[in-house]
Image (spheres, helix red, strand yellow):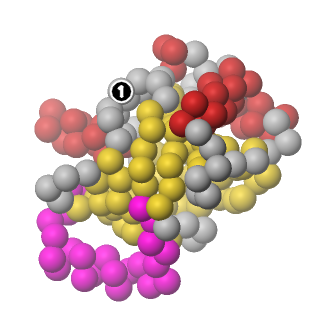
Amino acid sequence: MSVRIQEIKATCKNYDEVRNRILSQNARYIGFDHQIDHYFKIPHGRLKLRIGNIEKNLIYYQRPNRKGPKLSEVKLYPVHEPEKLNALLSSALDTLVIVDKQREIFFVENVKIHLDLVKDLGSFLEIEAIDEDDCFSDEALLQQCHQMMTQLNITPADLICDSYSDMLLKMQTRL
């Protein structure tokens, strides 16, 4: 499945307060997921295998690293036996980094919201305005992302440009 996503990532200094704001938007709670993302070294873009209780996908995407909303083209392949696929991929490709996170997942219509506690990094919030059926323009997705940022009181100072994988890689190079 191929989807377009307009997304932001931000630091989350007050997890409980942000969670209450999300719920005040009549968000549909999907659940709590412990996710291990295995990133593999590839020549272009990013390839990760997500192993979780709720989400189990092989994911390929390309996305710019910049603060604020960014548009991504994402290819998702549902995986029924992620541990077996991880063994196969790990035999063929080098591992770039592994991201271990506790994630709460919410939806407000087509907008997906994650509250993440990332091992070794801290608390974060992600907003993803998702277009699965090619029924939203890029501008409409951007507007949805901005609207949710406003409703959740996300300021420009809260925004971050790096992915969790990039932050962990930078941390590893400093050690």
Q: Is residue 88 above or below residue 164?
A: below
Q: How many numbered marks appear? A: 1
Identify which residue is drawn at 36% across, 27% down. Answer: 66
Q: Quadrant of the C terminus?
A: top left
Q: Circle 1 sits in a helix, a strand or a loop, which is it?
A: loop
Residue 143 visible in rendering: yes
Q: Is residue 155 above or below residue 83?
A: above
Quadrant in the picture for residue 83: bottom left
Label 1 neighbour load within 10 Å: few <14, some 14-19, many 20+: some
Q: Position of residue 129 (x, y in %)?
A: 60, 42
Quadrant in the picture for residue 71: top left
Residue 82 colored in magenta in the image: yes
Could you tell whether 5 is left or right of 121 in the image? right
**Closer-to-camera residue (74/9):** 74
Q: Amino acid at mark 1?
A: Arg
Q: Position of residue 168 (x, y in %)?
A: 28, 42
Could you tell whether 162 is left or right of 21 in the image? left
Q: Is residue 118 above or below residue 55?
A: above
Residue 126 visible in rendering: no
Residue 158 colored in magenta in the image: no
Q: Which residues are magenta?
A: 75-97
Could you tell whether 84 is left or right of 68 in the image? left
Q: Which residue is mark 1?
A: 66
Q: Position of residue 108 (x, y in %)?
A: 75, 44
Identify which residue is drawn at 33% across, 81% down. Answer: 85
Identify which residue is drawn at 23% across, 62% down. Answer: 40
Q: Position of residue 46 (x, y in %)?
A: 28, 54
**Closer-to-camera residue (175/173):** 173
Quadrant in the picture for residue 15: top right
